[in-house]
Image (spheres, rainbow, N blue to C red):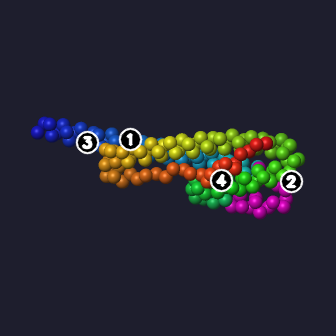
């Protein structure tokens, strides 16, 4: 009888510890996702400055600026990281516009914006790696025995890795 009580207590302790560990991993995922959001927001805050700087040199590119403003607004409404990545495509177009105007490339404000953007891009890449690391650790845990039993009981499910469009990620290189 005493042995049975000890086994039940140990089993309950294991379930409690494992459940708390899974909650901890889940919260780390939320925290790292928030980090991506912070860097996306910083980058999006640069957009109006970059647009104004480039706009002075390229009035006929109004369509690009409109698309960026719409995509930026959509991201802030949904806070969906995938929507945030759509803006990367428009960033590529703004950088291309800037490269087509030699006098703009020499503008100090444009140069500073480019450096800030490059810094934020590298921080965003790091935040994505942290997020994916947290998701991978969590997914491995909930799919490994015996934690998978507790994960199923408490309805923990796999999280998706953050996968930016490779074309977008590879083309957002700000070299000024």
* Lower sequence index among marks 1 and 2: 1
**16 relative to 80, above or below:** above
* Lower sequence index among marks 2 and 3: 3
Q: Is residue 89 visible?
A: yes
Please report the residue visible at 33 percent of the width from the left and 45 percent of the height from the top: 145
Q: Is label 1 in contact with label 4 (beta carbons under 8 Å)?
A: no
* Lower sequence index among marks 1 and 3: 3
Please report the residue visible at 58 percent of the width from the left and 58 percent of the height from the top: 78
Q: CA distance from mark 2 to mark 4?
A: 27 Å
**What residue is shown with label 4?**
167
**What residue is shown with label 2?**
57
**What residue is shown with label 3?**
12
Q: Residue furthest bottom?
A: 63
Which x, y percent locates residue 57?
A: 86, 53
Q: Is residue 73 left or right of residue 158?
A: right
Q: Is label 2 in contact with label 3 (beta carbons under 8 Å)?
A: no
**Label 3 Cα neighbours within 10 Å, binned few <14 / some 14-19 / many ≥20:** few
At mark 2, the secondary structure is loop
At mark 1, the secondary structure is helix
> Is the stretch drawn in magenta largely helix, strand or loop?
helix
Q: Which mark is residue 21?
A: 1
Please report the residue visible at 48 percent of the width from the left and 43 percent of the height from the top: 134
Q: Is residue 89 left or right of residue 1?
A: right
Which residue is at the front of the view, 70 or 94? 94
The magenta stretch spans residue 166:
no
**Label 2 Cα neighbours within 10 Å, binned few <14 / some 14-19 / many ≥20:** some
Q: CA distance from mark 1 to mark 3?
A: 14 Å
The magenta stretch spans residue 65:
yes
User: Which mark lies nearer to you, 4 or 3?
Assistant: 4
């Amino acid at each position: 009888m005493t042995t049975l009580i000890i086994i039940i207590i140990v089993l309950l302790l294991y379930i409690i510890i494992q459940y708390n560990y899974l909650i901890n991993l889940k919260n780390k995922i939320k925290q790292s996702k928030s980090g991506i959001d912070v860097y996306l927001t910083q980058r999006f805050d640069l957009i109006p400055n970059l647009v104004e700087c480039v706009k002075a040199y390229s009035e006929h590119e109004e369509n690009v600026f409109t698309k960026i403003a719409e995509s930026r607004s959509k991201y802030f409404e949904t806070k969906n990281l995938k929507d945030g990545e759509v803006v990367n495509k428009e960033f590529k177009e703004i950088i291309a516009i800037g490269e087509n105007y030699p006098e703009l490339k020499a503008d100090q404000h444009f140069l500073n914006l480019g450096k800030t953007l490059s810094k934020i891009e590298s921080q965003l890449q790091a935040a994505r790696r942290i997020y994916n690391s947290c998701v991978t650790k969590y997914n491995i845990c909930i799919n490994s025995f015996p934690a998978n039993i507790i994960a199923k009981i408490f309805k923990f499910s796999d999280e998706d890795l953050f996968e930016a469009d490779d074309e977008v990620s590879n083309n957002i290189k700000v070299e000024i």
